[in-house]
Image (spheres, rainbow, N blue to C red):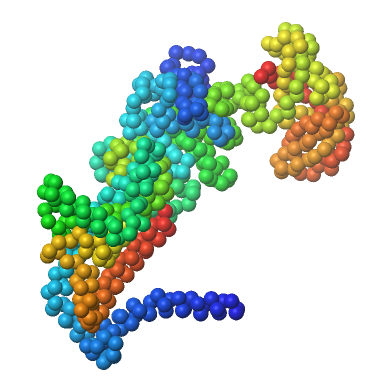
Amino acid sequence: MKAGGLLRIFCVLGFIFLYAPILSLIIFSFNESKLVTVWGGFSTKWYGELFRDPQILGSAWISFQVAFVTATLAVILGTLAAYVLVRFGRFRGRALLTGMSTAPLVMPEVITGLSLLLLFVSMEQLIGWPAGRGKTTIIIAHVTFCMAYVAVVVQSRLAGLDRDLEEAAMDLGARPVRVFFDITIPVIAPALVAGWLLAFTLSLDDLVVASFVTGPGASTLPMVIFSKVRLGVSPDINALATIIIVVVAIAVGLATWYMRRSARNG
Amino acid sequence: MNETVPVALRKPWAGGSEPPFVRIQKITKRFGDFTAVEDVSLDIFKGELFCLLGGSGCGKSTLLRMLAGFETPSSGRIEIDGQDMAGKAPYERPTNMMFQSYALFPHMSVEKNVAYGLQRDGIGRAEAHDRATDMLKMVQLSQFAGRKPHQLSGGQRQRVALARSLVKRPKLLLLDEPLGALDKKLREETQFELVKIQETLGVTFIVVTHDQEEAMTLSTRIGVMNEGVIVQVGEPSEIYEHPGSRFVADFIGSVNLFEGRVTEDKPDYVEIAAPDLGGSIHVGHGVSCTVNQQVWYAIRPEKVRLSRERPESRRNAFEGVIDEVAYLGNLSIFRIRLANGVLVRATRANLSRYDDEALTWDEKVWIAWDDTAGVVLTR
């Protein structure tokens, strides 16, 4: 089993490379010492410090609001896009719509951010909306790229949905709208939940796009962290990062579990 | 009309004043360049169990889907119970359909699946529950009412699908390969159950199937389809014993086909020269044909007699050698090679458990048949 042994070693090395930095971050978040690199004993004081910092709490609340609204809007728009792409067969501009709806997946964030900023500025000059930049503009920006992810996830689920189910419902007397809410939505629900969680974490994580399109008074959590770290890494950032990692891990874990469970139940 | 007499005995299709329940008039369906169903006209009567039989891609499912309203005919007219179905959506039609995939809603329990159609009609929760429960009792699934479809076996799912499509008491039930996904044993049991339910409820059934045995067992009448066209319509025995074309003769059951030319055409008999057999076939009744016309003689394997001695009658008797014997338990299939190399199939019921005299490989035998046993086909 020489090959197997070697494989195992590489596997372990790979995981260490990926997760050691995160692990050290989590460990040092419980460090007593103010020096980030020197272990001074176990303590949870940085977590306490964190929750007394109004700037952190405020931006966390903004981030949460933005992520929540973004995820919800992205699921609605992404599902509609997916439905059109899967169900409407060949229509004029289908290839264009496919390309446009998935483009944000590969578009560099800097370009997305910059172009949206330019759009918002010129829109404000032309029609007076959005007046200034803040949470609204961040949400709009986030929805543009999050809905692409949702569309991809929902599209695959929708393509796998047995058309007979919808026809059967129609045959039993349900009108198309009824069929959509009674049959289509419940059957693709796992993809909707997974898409929502995915959009939520993407929005929560984003720094670049948000930095471009935000305005005064609407700093998201990643922005606050970034600006703090530029002044030097303080241990309370480790604590904050740990919390974020836990939240994101739970969301991703839930999304995966939900997708798997529904795949099993067919 | 007399409703108490079963439709299979009433035979309204043979003539009479009873109006057809389903009237399909010159229906054509094209998908782009492809014609799936071509100029099909069909009358189906109340209480019938009508089978649309054909190979895959013959258009039978498309025809069924047009009756259900999932496809719109390119031209033609469908009437159900005197009502024109043009422009009627599936949810407005007096039909229900049982899908080949069963299409049970995976997120609903068995009972919710069955009650779904009733609730769409605005029937209250309590009454819907009662009727669903009754229907589940009829298909013997009462104890599974709370289960989800994925917790059921194939046979149980089939019965849920049947219950769901019957619970609304449709005037017409459309079944797409209803027994296709079941194994042989279960299929045979379910066939009889299906007929029983159909007779009890008096609903008109239209069944699509590719399985000729299923069609023979179930139906009052069969419509054989090929390449989008109805080739022949008739009662099972009619289709089997009086096929109208080589396609039908070959598609339903197995058959020996010999090509030949009419040499004598008399009102009470016909003589056909068949090079395949190395002789001539005597047909003991008149046939509408002309001398020298090319015809095909179709004879079923079970109507071919085998004997070691030369039969008394010299007519329709030919000599050959047994090429192959297949023992199927209830009967044996023989393949007899004639002098010119043509193979003829014959079957024999295994009447005795100990048959020392059984015909076997490489034996010389005579094949023979009655002069009314076969069918003369002109196309």
Residue B254 lies left or right of residue B8; in this view the side is right
Query: A177 or A117: which is nearer to us?
Result: A117
Rendered position, B116 above or below A22 = above
Q: Which x, y percent locates residue B238?
A: 61, 23
In the picture, the quarter occupied by the C terminus of chain B is top right
Query: B228 or A226: which is nearer to us?
Result: A226
Task: Name the residue: 47% across, 30% down.
Answer: B31
Residue found farthest to the bottom: A40
Total of numbered circles in the picture?
Answer: 0
In the picture, the quarter occupied by the N terminus of chain B is top left
Q: Which x, y percent locates residue B14?
A: 52, 16
Residue B291 lies left or right of residue B379; in this view the side is right
Task: Name the residue: 26% across, 72% down.
Answer: A244
Q: Which x, y percent locates residue A34?
A: 22, 88
When asked about the image quadrant of residue B378, the answer is: top right
Task: Name the residue: 52% across, 41% down.
Answer: B179
Residue B189 lies left or right of residue A250; in this view the side is right
Rendered position, A198 above or below B263 = below
Rendered position, B325 above or below B72 = below
Query: B164 or A191: which is nearer to us?
Result: A191
- Asked whether residue B21 appears in the rendered view, the answer is no
Query: B110 or B352: which is nearer to us?
Result: B110
- Asked whether residue A125 appears in the rendered view, the answer is yes
Q: Which x, y percent locates residue A97?
A: 34, 44
When asked about the image quadrant of residue A50, the answer is: bottom left
Task: Name the residue: 28% across, 90% down.
Answer: A38
